Amino acid sequence: MPADSGVVLGDDGLARPAWASVDPLLREYYDTEWGMPVRDEQELFERVSLEAFQSGLSWATILRKRPAFRAAFDDFDPDAVAGYGEADIERLLGDAGIIRNRAKITATIANARATVALRADPEVDGGLVGLIWSFRPAQTPAPARFDDIPTTSPESIALAAALRAKGFRFVGPTTMFALMEAAGLIDTHLLASHRRGSSGIWPR
């Protein structure tokens, strides 16, 4: 493996970026989930929510807490979360299994309500899924090294603005770029990674 390939060769002979090469949880996530297309409303709402909670923290922290998040937020069912009130906020603030940040918790509830509202929005075709996927770019990055991967794009900036206009919170351009990576709108797998092109949307 060339020294400048940006990847680490695992004991299974597969090349991964350094962040996914050691921790078994991150490795499994990278090999099976990250970068695969997400076109289901509930799954996409979960991704939006967890990306917001991740802000300022490591993704490994969020991934380890994901089961607790799912239990606390009714599996991120937008209809259920949209109905949360003050008692639910207090319940969530007392749940040590999740990130107990009031601003992020209330943002998730607001985002659930915005997700429900998008279903009937005449300006949006396909609700949350249709809105987010409408910002899929014409081309994807082709990074040879980790430093080649951008943290924002014109599309993530536009997506963030569009979501904010519809009432979403904690959806800045960097967070939305991470969402686009995770949900398959773009492919930022390193060129030498065994997962490059695995989404079926972008060529290797």
Image: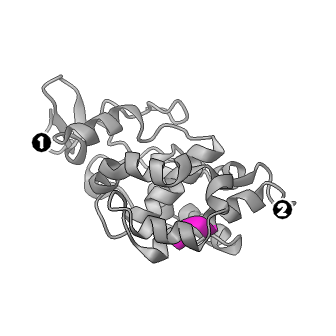
Name the residue carrying label 1: 3
| SS for dot 2 | loop
Q: Is residue 78 left or right of residue 149?
A: right
Dominant secondary structure (helix, strand or loop) of the stretch shown in magenta: helix
Residue occupying image coordinates x 48% and y 37%: 36
Name the residue carrying label 2: 123
Tag 1: Cα neighbours inside 10 Å, few (<14), some, or many (≥20)? few
> What's the amino acid at mark 1?
Ala
Is there any visible trace of residue 122 in the rendered image? yes
Q: Position of residue 198 (x, y in %)?
A: 44, 30
Q: Is residue 123 left or right of residue 198?
A: right
Q: Position of residue 135 (x, y in %)?
A: 64, 55
> What's the amino acid at mark 2?
Glu
Tag 2: Cα neighbours inside 10 Å, few (<14), some, or many (≥20)? few
Q: Is residue 186 left or right of residue 34?
A: right
| SS for dot 1 | loop
Front residue (pair 18, 1): 18
Please state the extent of the stretch shown in magenta in the rendering.
106-110
Q: Earlier in the sequence, mark 2 or mark 1?
A: 1
Q: Quadrant of residue 131?
A: bottom right
Residue 107 included in the magenta stretch of the image: yes
Q: Position of residue 203 (x, y in %)?
A: 49, 32
Above or below — where is 137 with respect to 197? below
Residue 35 included in the magenta stretch of the image: no
Front residue (pair 154, 42): 42
Residue occupying image coordinates x 28% and y 56%: 61
Q: Quadrant of residue 150?
A: bottom left
